[in-house]
Image: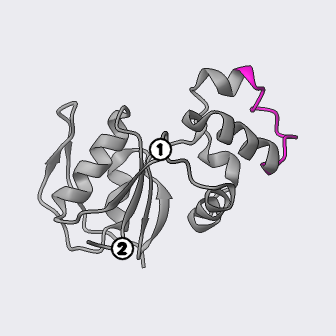
Amino acid sequence: MTDITIFHNPKCGTSRNVLALIRHAGLEPRIVEYMSALPSRDEIRALAIAAGQPLRALLREKETAFTELGLADPALSDDALLDAIQQHPVLLNRPIVVTPLGTALCRPSEAVLELLPVGPLPPFTKEDGEVVHDSGKRRG
């Protein structure tokens, strides 16, 4: 087991590709299927801080609930955004990955490569057939 956690939605192709890339690196992450095991408000807030992003950056704008709840309003507080995520976990964008090298929302999926504590990986083919080439660039 590694010190890697993925906040994962198995119904999301990007999330599945990120999980596969982590495993392609020979690593087995702790998988948090957040749709059924939503992190606490404090943990979500901490993920945003660790990623160096405002909480709003972790929202999935493509979801119907985003529009229906008026979450595009910049005047909404973080507490209001957290309330919405608690009511509609699908609003939490995915996948969020935490490793010893950092925390990030990994969209596109190859963004996870900068977080993996391993050397350059051989090419990886995503679900859609796109081939990902690892430059070997890592954080830190």
Q: Position of residue 46 (x, y in %)?
A: 63, 65
Disc 1 residue crowd, few under 14, some 14–19, many 20+, Cα 10 Å:
many
Residue at image x 49%, y 65%?
Answer: 103
Q: Tell which of 34 and 76 is nearer to you.
A: 34
**Left or right: where 117 falls relative to 5:** left
105 is higher (above) or lower (below) than 10 = below
Tell me the number on the disc at residue 94: 1
Query: Main SS of the magenta segment?
Result: loop
Q: Secondary structure at mark 1?
A: loop
Image quarter of residue 48:
bottom right
Could you tell me the amino acid type at mark 2? Answer: Asp
Q: Tell which of 24 and 4 is nearer to you.
A: 4
Tell me the number on the disc at residue 3: 2
What is the residue that sits farthest to the bottom in this orientation? 140
Q: Tell which of 108 and 69 is nearer to you.
A: 69
Which numbered mark, 2 or 1, is in the foreground of this view? Answer: 2
The region drawn magenta spans 68-78
Based on the picture, tell me whether residue 19 belongs to the magenta stretch: no
Disc 2 residue crowd, few under 14, some 14–19, many 20+, Cα 10 Å:
few
